[in-house]
Amino acid sequence: MKQWRERLKEKKRIVVKIGSSSLQHPETGDMDYIRLEVLVRELCNLKNQGKDVVLVSSGAIAQGKKAVHPDPSHMEKNPIAVKQACAAVGQARLMMTYQKIFAEYNQVAAQILMTRHTVDNDMNRVNAQNTFEELLYMGVIPIVNENDTVATHEIEIGDNDTLSAIVASMIGADLLILLSDIDGLYTDDPRTNPEASFVETVEHLDRHFLQMGKSSTGSGVGTGGMSTKLTAARIATASGADMIIANSRDIRIIHRLVEGRNLGTLFLAEKQENFDLPAFVGGLHEKHDSKGETS
Ligand code: GLU
């Protein structure tokens, strides 16, 4: 509906999430500098309109692997340690690249790395909230990722769709944009079901929509799928933010969305005054843990 898209123009605090597959060349897995550059330009332009902007960026593990080429047999023996070492290398590389490009637009960027403790420990959460507030007040663009180097299963959030919604909730954002390799929500998987139809707006995120979640995007990179996007939508909308799933094929979609154009799937905010973020996130992991999944 037109008026819902129109109100996107008024958003003041925007979180944008981009996944690993949207930042790299599919042929090689190496960073796509043109896409990174366009992303940074779009974010700086939102900032120049007086909006607060936060970026949640994946890519640490993928870029670390590209840098150190871990030995496959070693990786098989120590998968977690190798992944964490790769994240340590890749996160630094990713930030170095972001810092350089943001600097070209005279924009200061900061790094915030989180784990599940940042949500469920009251002191950590309040500290993180204060840091975000201060950075945004200073006009800085925070770049957030999971702290993959220390986050093993027990303390990990697990995917950046959920992480970005947690960030949106913690900072009281009014819009979360999830950039992905799909156009948005379909009634079924469009790659396998030609009858699947596109959902433009989700006014009320009920069981009917939640069942449309599928567990894979098919890109083979990153950890997000439609089910994590719907979890993100539950957190974001209950916290009072609109959320959009949109295709990152052309990253300039960011400004088109904020101009109110009818692209992607828009989930309307339905603020629940008693929404308890730590309890919700704790509940997600209890479910995973009891099923023995490694998420
Ligand atoms: N935190 C991971 C990384 O930066 C990615 C998680 C995700 O894509 O959801 O490599």
Image (spheres, helix red, strand yellow):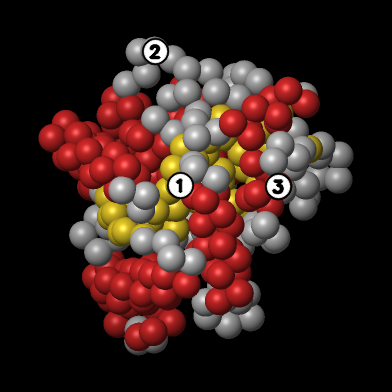
| Residue 111 spot, x, y in % from top left | 30, 59
| Residue 33 spot, x, y in % from top left | 55, 76
Q: Earlier in the sequence, mark 1 or mark 2?
A: 1
The N terminus - image quarter: top right
Q: Quadrant of residue 209?
A: top right
Circles 1 and 2: CB distance less than 8 Å? no
Element assignment for label 2: loop
Label 2 CB, ligand 1: below 8 Å? no
Which residue is at the front of the view, 11 or 175?
11
Q: Quadrant of residue 106?
A: bottom left
Q: Earlier in the sequence, mark 1 or mark 3?
A: 1
Assess disc 1: are there few (<14), some (14-19) or many (≥20) residues with their C-alpha within 10 Å of its C-alpha: many
Nearest to the eye among marks 1 and 2: give it: 1
Q: Earlier in the sequence, mark 3 or mark 2?
A: 3
Assess disc 3: are there few (<14), some (14-19) or many (≥20) residues with their C-alpha within 10 Å of its C-alpha: few
* Residue 295 visible in image: no
| Residue 228 spot, x, y in % from top left | 50, 42
Residue identifier under label 1: 53
Task: Farthest residue to the left: give it.
Answer: 123
Question: What's the amino acid at mark 3?
Answer: Arg
Residue identifier under label 2: 273
Assess disc 2: are there few (<14), some (14-19) or many (≥20) residues with their C-alpha within 10 Å of its C-alpha: few
- Identity of the residue drawn at 56% across and 62% down: 41
Residue identifier under label 3: 256
Which residue is at the front of the view, 164 or 38?
38
Label 1 CB, ligand 1: below 8 Å? no
